[in-house]
Image (tube, rainbow, N blue to C red):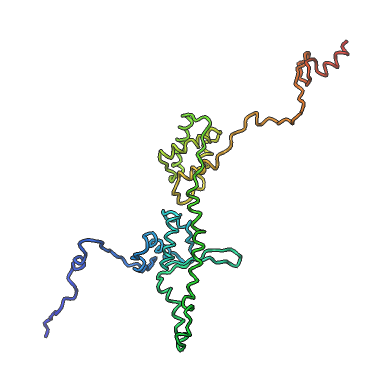
């Protein structure tokens, strides 16, 4: 009776986990999340009708806290996709039932867009239909009017009217050609060389302003125009590097806009600062006195008033 008899091993032999790994395809190495995670259903991650951009955007929206802003422009600043692709992805999510947007008028009169994100659209669509069957169980089917079933359907129609209003400005802003880069009156090689050196040196002040040679050649005439108009190099550097947006995705486009929009006017010359004469005014020229060489105004040369007064006294 004292002899121990083991009928089954206490645990599986080592190496069974490694043997279960597939020889090809994806291999998952999963770690358990205890904080800062979002549960996403496979009906979304494996959706066959949604694009990858729409699926990724839905995952990002579901991970945000309540009250976060998810406008098209804000999402375009956060991700490398354009506003047009983000707007198309939002429309996909609306069509699939993961997203619902509507226009709401606040108490102060402002009209805002209210966005409702659903992590599972089938449960959200089935929710309005559950309270209705228990409400009228004894009534015959003829007493249940057919139009009552699609009663919740009028909620989605308000979304299509406001979609074009949000998406139209983006293509308009992108298709408008940018203004031409200003060019100096005297485009000398020395002036262009100094302008190119100033543009290439901007990365020392702001590391995100690293420009390729092609963009420097395009923007150099604009900076040369600033230098031609006696703008100090430090003034140009401050105008081009102050208050940069974060993140900066298109440094060349930003510099092109600032070079064109902030271009100072030419310095006025001496003839521009002269006092303008009234039309029809008679200007009497200056003469030098033949005796004392004092300047006086007269139409004819001769003596000044003091010398003319002393002449009779001397006689």
Q: Indicate whether 132 appears above or below 183.
A: below
Name the one closer to the observer, 51 or 30.
51
Query: Where is residue 16 shown, x and y percent of the image?
Result: 19, 68
Give left or right: position of 24 versus 263.
left
Residue at left offset 79%, top offset 15%: 302
Which residue is situated farthest in the top direction here? 315
Name the one closer to the observer, 260 or 156.
156
In the picture, which quadrant includes the C terminus? top right
Name the one closer to the observer, 209 or 161.
161
Query: Where is residue 215 shown, x and y percent of the image?
Result: 43, 40
Residue at left offset 60%, top offset 65%: 109
Query: Where is residue 228 shown, x and y percent of the image?
Result: 54, 32
Which residue is situated farthest in the front direction here? 142
Q: Indicate whether 43 appears above or below 130.
A: above
Give left or right: position of 78 versus 18.
right
Residue at left offset 39%, top offset 64%: 59
Query: Where is residue 61 shown, x and y percent of the image?
Result: 43, 63
Residue at left offset 55%, top offset 35%: 231
Name the one closer to the observer, 314 or 256.
256
Q: How many marks?
A: 0
């Amino acid at each position: 009776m004292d002899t121990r008899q083991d009928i089954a091993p206490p645990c599986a032999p080592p190496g069974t986990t490694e043997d279960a790994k597939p020889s090809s395809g994806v291999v998952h190495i999963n770690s358990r999340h205890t904080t800062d995670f979002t549960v996403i259903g496979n009906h979304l991650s494996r959706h066959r009708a949604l694009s990858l951009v729409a699926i990724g955007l839905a995952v990002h929206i579901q991970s945000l806290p309540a009250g976060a802003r998810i406008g098209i422009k804000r999402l375009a600043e956060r991700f490398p996709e354009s506003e047009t692709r983000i707007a198309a992805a939002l429309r996909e999510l609306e069509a699939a039932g993961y997203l619902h947007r509507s226009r709401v008028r606040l108490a102060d009169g402002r009209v805002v867009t209210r966005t409702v994100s659903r992590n599972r659209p089938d449960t959200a669509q089935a929710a309005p239909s559950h309270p209705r069957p228990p409400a009228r169980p004894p009534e015959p089917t003829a007493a249940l009017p057919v139009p009552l079933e699609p009663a919740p359907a009028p909620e989605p129609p308000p979304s299509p009217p406001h979609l074009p209003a949000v998406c139209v400005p983006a293509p308009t802003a992108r298709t408008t050609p940018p203004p031409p880069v200003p060019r100096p009156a005297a485009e000398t090689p020395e002036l262009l060389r100094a302008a190119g050196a100033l543009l290439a040196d901007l990365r020392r002040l702001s590391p995100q302003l690293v420009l390729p040679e092609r963009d420097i050649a395009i923007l150099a005439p604009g900076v040369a125009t600033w230098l031609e108009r006696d703008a100090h190099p430090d003034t140009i550097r401050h105008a081009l590097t102050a208050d940069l947006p974060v993140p900066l995705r298109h440094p060349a486009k930003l510099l092109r806009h600032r070079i064109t929009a902030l271009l100072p006017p030419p310095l006025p010359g001496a003839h521009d600062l002269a006092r303008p004469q009234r039309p029809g005014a008679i200007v009497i020229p200056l003469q030098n006195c033949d005796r004392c060489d004092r300047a006086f105004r007269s139409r004819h040369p001769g003596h000044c008033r003091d010398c003319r007064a002393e002449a009779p006294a001397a006689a």
